[in-house]
Image (spheres, rainbow, N blue to C red):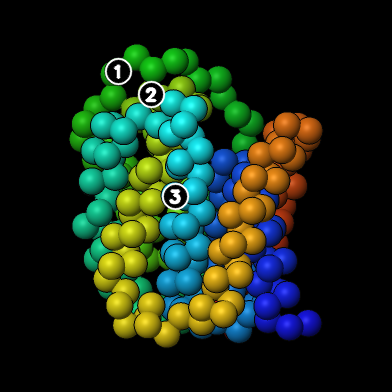
Amino acid sequence: MSALVLALIAGAVVGLALGALGGGGSVLAVPALIYLLGFTPAAATTASLIIVTATSLTALYAHARTGNVRWRAGALFAAAGLLPAAAAGAAASRLPQPVLTASFAGVAAVAAVGMLRPSRAVSPATGGARPARAAGAGAGLGALTGLLGVGGGFLAVPALVTVLTFEMQAAVGTSLLVISANSLASLATRGATTAGVHWAVVGPFTGAAILGAWDGKRLAARVTGGLLKRTFAVVLLAVAAFMLADAVV
């Protein structure tokens, strides 16, 4: 099967997961780029950032139109992560490939376990968030985005709900602003690696992901959220186990 066809299929699956779950789909982008399309871990994290940025900006526009983005709070949360994202992005190309792969496997496993845990009811926003906690969460998310090339929606949404006490719809919409800002900051420090990006593969992958995200929204309306999350979590655990084994062997 040609690289173009594989890129289109992988992009559609990533976008479908993002659209259906509101986060987490980008975690599949890096392993797809490595094991299906032959990218090195460093090149895959850079390409994933490009895919995540384009998809997140598109989704951000859609959420902004429905009023689900809290611009001021999101900008402050994102600002805390800009420097960590840039620093981690610059450091990623210097880390050994097995370290990057093992780190990514660990993050994927954490995301999967989080999806398998029962959802807890969240009360509406009360404005009682602590600035220090918000800054710490924003910085940690920025570092994760820069280092591993993941959007971090699976971590950003819970952080916005628990730390900033957002209702779920506002958390999903605002997380896209945070993800977009962190991804752009990380890409800005990856000049050497972005110059070697295989655009003939990354371009179709990104386009398919954007289109797949719209289909994912329609899928979410037909299938229960719990079933979608459990299915995705099982796939993610399998991917994490495979990547960890590949890193240590």
Secondary structure beneath dot 1 equals: loop
- Residue type at the position of mark 2: Thr
Residue 200 percent across, percent down from the top left: 57, 80
Residue drawn 33% across the image and 51% down it: 181
Q: Nearer the viewer, residue 143 or 189?
A: 189
- Upstream in sequence: badge 1 or badge 3: 3
Residue drawn 30% across the image and 77% down it: 191
Secondary structure beneath dot 2 equals: loop
Q: Do the CB atoms of the residues marked 2 and 1 lie less than 8 Å apart?
A: yes
Viewed as shown, does residue 26 lie left or right of 166?
right
- Upstream in sequence: badge 3 or badge 2: 3
Q: Nearer the viewer, residue 247 or 33?
A: 33
Residue at the outermost front position = 65
Residue underneath mark 1: 127
Residue drawn 63% across the image and 80% down it: 37
Residue 130 percent across, percent down from the top left: 24, 27
Viewed as shown, does residue 226 lie left or right of 186?
right
Residue underneath mark 3: 57
Measure the C-alpha gap from mark 3 to mark 2. Answer: 23 Å
